[in-house]
Image (spheres, coloured by chain):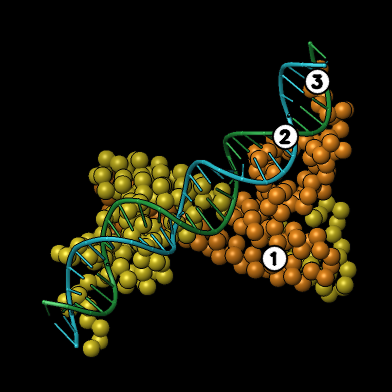
Chain colours: A orange, B yellow, C green, D cyan
Amino acid sequence: MDSPKYKEMSTTTIKDVSKQFGISADALRYYERAGMIPPVSRTAGGVRDYQDEDLRWVELALCLRSAGLPVEVIAEYVQLSQSGSDTIPNRLALLEQQRKVLLEQQRQTGAALDRLNHKITVYQNALKTGTLNWNKEET
Amino acid sequence: MDSPKYKEMSTTTIKDVSKQFGISADALRYYERAGMIPPVSRTAGGVRDYQDEDLRWVELALCLRSAGLPVEVIAEYVQLSQSGSDTIPNRLALLEQQRKVLLEQQRQTGAALDRLNHKITVYQNALKTGTLNWNKEET
DNA sequence: TATTGACTTGGAGTGGACTTCAAGGATTAT
DNA sequence: ATAATCCTTGAAGTCCACTCCAAGTCAATA
């Protein structure tokens, strides 16, 4: 009774994938509907049965989403990828554009981290010495 | 007639600050309402008149927001900062927690950048040679 | 004094990314 | 055969961070 569901457990269900990536099944369906991944393979009964390629798309989508790229942009890349090699220049342009976005984001996060680190140092010092000494330009 | 508004232009209005930081006046009011910055100084008539310290708070809020820290978290930091030095350990804990968040975010953005860079290289090559050669594990 | 125009507030509306729901279909267990 | 699950879809709901709006106030100018 080791949970053989759906024939001989030959399928990789949405639940399996959900667990594997730590994302809800609802989110996976949403990703597919939104075009962030190409249509997933199905069984005869219409149940999703993720193949290796489907899983690779899911992984890519999650990687890009976790960096903050909008669903719409990822969907556009997927759409181009499904539309023949004519679209390679378009894909390249899209990827280069998004690289810029991520680099800028990286920069801003770095700036915020610098602020946090500075404050942390000051507060740690305050705790050690019992006195807060901001210089006049700080909040 | 060099636009002297409100007495001798002694005030720094929300409009001025809006321009200075490239953020809408509505957003600045929202930031204040949400507690992301402490209450801004006002004229006798109730009009906001941003002082240097107010501006420093705005700048901090923007820096942290642009890195993606939630409004709620920034508001909590501001609230603690307005509540006496008893809250220094709390502030420190909050800052260290958020540093972790930003470092993780930095990591994820880096991973996505690696993916983008790799794809960009492959596509550039495809354009040069006229052939796409993904290795078998790619999308 | 009246008009103009920027400011005020509270509240409603928007967009993005899910999340939850209702109704129904498929597969395995009894 | 029927119940118990798990799956399906489309649509509605939620949360966040603004953004916009209506009605009213304030300050400088005609």
Q: Is residue B130 left or right of residue A61?
A: right
Q: Which badge, 2 or 3, is on the more N-terminal residue?
A: 3
Q: On screen, B39 above or below A131? A: below
Find residue B71 and report its horizontal and vertical position in percent. Answer: 42, 51
Question: Which structural element holds mark 1?
Answer: helix
Please give the label number shown on residue B32: none
Q: Going 23% across and 88% down the picture, which residue do you hit?
A: B1
Instruction: Give the amino acid at mark 2.
Output: Lys
Q: Is residue B2 above or below residue A2?
A: below
Tell me which numbered mark, 1 or 2, is placed earlier along the sequence: 2
Residue drawn at the location 36% of the way across and 66% of the way down = B25
Whether marks 2 and 3 lie on the same chain: yes
Label 2 residue SS: helix
Q: Are marks 1 and 3 in contact (CB under 8 Å)?
A: no
**Which numbered circle lies on residue A95?**
1
Question: Callout 2: few (<14), some (14-19), or many (20+) C-alpha neighbours within 10 Å?
Answer: some
Where is residue D22, by image quadrant?
A: bottom left
Which of pointers 1 and 3 lies earlier in the amino acid sequence?
A: 3
